[in-house]
Amino acid sequence: MLIVAVALVVAATGVPATASAATPRPASAATESVEVAAASSRDAGGLLITTPPAPSEVSIAATPTISPSVTTKTVVPGGTYTCPYGNFCAQVWSGTAWKVFFLYNCRIYDLFNWTGTGYWRNNQTSGATNPYFLGSQGIPINVLPLSPSSGSTDWDPVYSISVRC
């Protein structure tokens, strides 16, 4: 039965089976704020994000990374950054600051050392389909809302992010 259900999910979503390694660790809850940033020639009205305080009781064994590599930015707790229009932005704690990953191309991104509670915002173009998180077997574990949307997540079970167009 489970194999049939997995096959139906893969057939319905077109998700290829892919997986990568991540080290689980306890999550800590925090909040962040999201607002629309003033439009500029560079971000065309991106989302201005204010990061939450540092998570409590979370130690990081290794720096979070992604493959293929993307543009990243390090933001201190309480700092701000803009998630540009056309991007899916993912935020993970890196030990001393929030590390923000700007996913722009339509593909599957494998996550390494992403742990604890983090945040995402979908600011893709208006024609893009729903992005989703993939678990260890390459099966969708969370289909996200269309753009513009944002939320928090426990990165521990997430092995990949699929950004679709």
Image: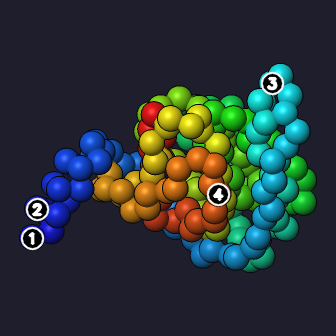
Residue under the point 63% across and 37% down: 87
Amino acid tagged 2: Val
N-terminal-most mark, 2 or 3: 2
Residue 150 badge: 4
Q: Position of residue 12 (x, y in %)?
A: 23, 50
Amino acid tagged 4: Ser
Do the CB atoms of the residues marked 2 and 1 lie less than 8 Å apart?
yes
How far apart are labels 2 and 1 at the CA level?
5 Å
Residue that badge 1 annotates: 1
Nearer to me, 142 or 108? 142
Q: Position of residue 94 (x, y in %)?
A: 72, 55
Residue under the point 60% across and 75% down: 26
Say whether residue 49 is left or right of residue 132. Answer: right
Say whether residue 121 is left or right of residue 9. Answer: right
Residue under the point 45% across and 52% down: 132
Residue that badge 3 annotates: 42
N-terminal-most mark, 2 or 4: 2
